[in-house]
Image (cartoon, helix red, strand yellow):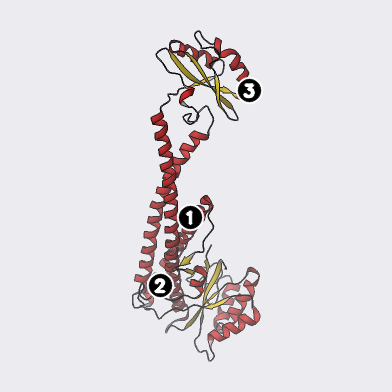
Amino acid sequence: MASRYWMVSLSVQNSATSPWGKVQEQISRNAFDTPLYHFNIPNLRVGTLDSLLALGDDILKSNSYIEGVSHKIRRQIEELERVSGAESNALTVDGVPVDSYLTRFVWDEARYPTMSPLRDIVDGIHSQVSKIEDDLKVRVAEYNNVRSQLNAINRKQSGSLAVRDLSNLVKPEDIVTSENLVTLLAVVPKYSQKDWLASYETLTNYVVPRSSKKLFEDNEYALYTVTLFRRVADNFRTNAREKGFQIRDFEFSSEAHESRKQELERLMQDQENLRSSLLQWCYTSYGEVFSSWMHFCAVRVFAESILRYGLPPSFLACVLAPSVKSEKKVRSILEGLCDSANSIYWKSEDETGGGMAGLGGEADAHPYVSFTINLA
């Protein structure tokens, strides 16, 4: 599947032979590695020249916007699949791969009646895509909110012992709590453990001998318990801090621990449900936006061709996917298929530095309508 296509239209006025046949023959003979497809555009309602000119700038702005929304949804799909490790599914429009939808485009008369003014079609497409983008923002914000909550919990559970949540490291049997006794939790630098074990009983009076027990160790610290009389707890904290040992405030509660566990499980389930729902929505919405974008491109080709070649509408619209090395050759072929006077006019303008940019706004001016569609 190519990720970059050219959409072009060539004037077929005063053509004695089949224009499509001529294009096929020239491309197959001189650039056989370039896929070529006929792009079918219905007879749309032309309106007045003034209305077409007024539509020109809006078409360019809307095209950039719609293309941007399609890429935003595609990137969101890639991110969701990367997070879950799921295999990527093909992007489709109602089950049709997007590249096939582009190269075998059929106008949807039910959604976009051809008798509608071009302005109404353009504004309608822009409005539809805008609603989808607004919905995307709401859904992504909801998903990211749950992810942020989960990340905050995970940081608390996986950070340094100096700051992390200790509830999942301490068991009920590790704690002694009575009217007179209390168990404190000490965070000891990893390389000061010998110092702790040699000194904790003497940091204050009334420390229960041999009561310190190591519960956990990470790359920086070790977590120890120590049991002592409740009345000397504050004095012990002060003396421990002076020796570089941190006493963490902790009160074991089985109810609070169970509540935190349930909250974590709920958030994990919510994240997976939202991820799955958002991914499915993105697949569907990408198809809708892509379909709208292709209809928009059809309107753009039609409008630019009328402004370029005049009335009545008489042009051939094609889609090509040249390789980078074939681009110059294909451009030369397309130029050779244009009306010779028109080609000479455009060449002379380019050579004098005054080349017309055309409605398409492409950096390079050509004697035919041309713009690029980037699928990725």
Q: Quadrant of the N terminus?
A: bottom right
Q: Tell me which residue sits at (41%, 29%) in the image.
A: 254
Q: Earlier in the sequence, mark 2 or mark 3?
A: 2
- Relative to residue 43, is residue 353 drawn left or right? right
Q: Is residue 333 visible?
A: yes
Rendering quarter of residue 188? top right
Of badges 1 and 3, nearer the viewer stands 3
Please state the horizontal and vertical placement of residue 20, each as a whole percent of the image.
Answer: 54, 84
User: In front: 347, or 35?
Assistant: 35
Please state the horizontal and vertical placement of residue 191, each as a whole percent of the image.
Answer: 63, 22
Q: Earlier in the sequence, mark 2 or mark 1?
A: 2
Q: Which mark is residue 76?
A: 1
Q: Secondary structure at mark 2?
A: helix
Q: CA distance from mark 1 to mark 3?
A: 45 Å
What residue sits right under mark 2 in the picture?
53
What residue sits right under mark 3 in the picture?
191
Query: With respect to residue 249, does 136 lie above or below?
Result: below
Crowd rating for badge 3 (residues with CA inside 10 Å; few <14, some 14–19, many 20+): few
Q: Secondary structure at mark 3?
A: helix
Rendering quarter of residue 265? top left
Query: With respect to residue 172, does 319 lie above or below?
Result: below
Please state the horizontal and vertical placement of residue 231, each as a whole percent of the image.
Answer: 43, 10
Q: Secondary structure at mark 1?
A: helix
